[in-house]
Amino acid sequence: MSQARRLNGDAKQRKKDKKMKNIYTPRPGGDPEDEDIHACEVTETTDTPAWHRHFEPDELLGRYEPIRELGRGSYGVVYEGKVLKKYGKLEPGMKVAIKKVRRVFHTETDAKRLLRELRILRILRNHDSIVTLYDIVPPKEPRRFAALTLVFEFVDADLGKIFRTNQFFTTLHVQYMLYQILLGMKYMHSAKIVHRDLKPANILINEDCSIKICDFGLARGFSEDPDQLKDKGNDDGDDEKNGNVANGGKGGDEQKNGDNHNEEDDKKAKKKNRMALLKKKKPGKDQKKLKQRAITRHVVTRWYRGPEVILLQQKQSTLSAVDMWSIGAIFAELLQMQRENRPDPTKRGPIFPGDSCFPLSIKDQMDYASRVDQMQVIFDVIGSPDESEIAKITDEKARKYLRNLPQRKKKNLKRMFPGADKHALDLMTQLLKFDVDKRITVDQALEHPYLKPVRDPAHERAKKPVTFSFESAQLGQKKLRELILEEVIKYNKYDEERLIKSGAMPNYKRMKEKEAKNAAKQQKQ
């Protein structure tokens, strides 16, 4: 009898499991607040491609076919895809990365971040060391779209993945890769743009060792107010909402609010929803795991942040130094890929793996004894700053914090990297200076003797400086929608008339009408 009951129970469980297979469950690692986005989304049958869950059959206009998912999160989803028909520089059969960004207008900050990234990618798209954005698929409903599909060049892997393999590099490999990263930085910095989130996961690499810098979600122009950078640059949410071409971006599900929706309303609504969820149920194991993963993503980014970012001491005049510190930290990991520096691949890792961060993460902001504090980990390698360097810090609490830290002596880098020559160690020392005024610039780094074997000055291109006028303005959803659609037109000139007639671009329409009138007047004259 008990056996019959057990068999009957197993049959019921199998029937239940079969039903559950038709329910899409959000993948762990996404934003906990977005867990209900696809709660009732039904998976396709075995005859229907899995990508149909994310893209309508005609959404990609017959230009691209998604092949396999590369990554997903609160931002949306990224697929490897192929080109189906010639469009612009794209030839049929070419591999591409298709990134669908959801919840574009979730907040004004999210919309501005996407707009900024689109602008920067367009401005920098002609450089070999910067990932290329090939296309922005025009939305079907210009006045109501809440998601946007971006098409990037496909790159095999990123440095973060390569660092976790068992392969080794030669000195020439390291020099060539570092040189390419610096070429991309020179192009950016000459345009008065700083990346501000350089890390191995944002450095893409092909089989031929060509390098592509990606993920410009946290990038800024030099002309921005540095006080705004202090607030934005240390927002944990920034790290979690961005991702590279292989696994991220901004966005989320459909925006249902009206055009008058603003950032303040977004914050209030978001807080209200979060409080309602907390009251509804206590966090379980899954929620705790999701939170831990979010914290981990923030920690990884922290490992490559300069001391001035951690201490909220960014200055407009030395903003580019933020990127140079990150390059120094990445360079340290590149050197570990040489057998003579790390014979055992399992011993590789970031040079500054801190677990907490003054003044944001530790419970006690004056917990000087914390050995895992990011600044402590940094000083264990580069040594403690002297009094003249500490005196330059404008924040009194930060100065007190630094003066109360245990004094550290600079590590012997030759012991850390026994196979590196004096030029490699000198370049790393110059990149990892606590004082931004003493830290080496991108032009100085390119001229360093370590890079002489791979240097070609003809490739060291500069770009005319640019400014982003929308940064400090309160634009609202309507204007941001229009500015994003202007970026869409840059890649889809043929669709300009439809987008204008949709009514989503009144300012652009007036500008085009004025241009047409002026052109008609000139013809008459």
Image: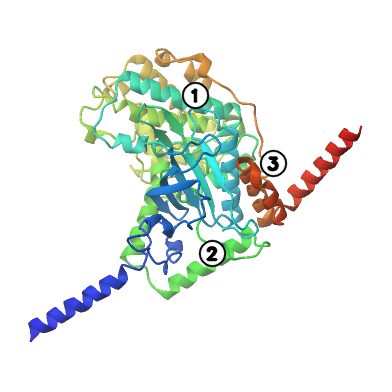
- Residue nearer the viewer, 215 or 210: 210
Mark 3: which secondary structure? loop
* Labels 2 and 1 touching (C-beta < 8 A): no
- Residue nearer the viewer, 253 or 448: 253
Instruction: Answer with mark 1 or mark 3, whichever residue precedes in sequence.
Output: 1
* Labels 1 and 3 touching (C-beta < 8 A): no
Residue denoted by label 3: 469
* Label 3 – label 2 distance at C-alpha: 28 Å
Residue denoted by label 1: 183
Q: Residue at x 42, y 58 (%)?
A: 52
Q: Which quadrant, please, contains the N terminus?
A: bottom left
| Observer able to see residue 444 | yes
Question: Relative to residue 280, is residue 86 depicted above or below?
Answer: above
| Observer able to see residue 298 | no
Which one is closest to the eye, mark 3 or mark 2? 3
Quadrant of residue 106 within the rendered picture: bottom right
Residue denoted by label 2: 270
Q: Position of residue 449 (x, y in %)?
A: 42, 13
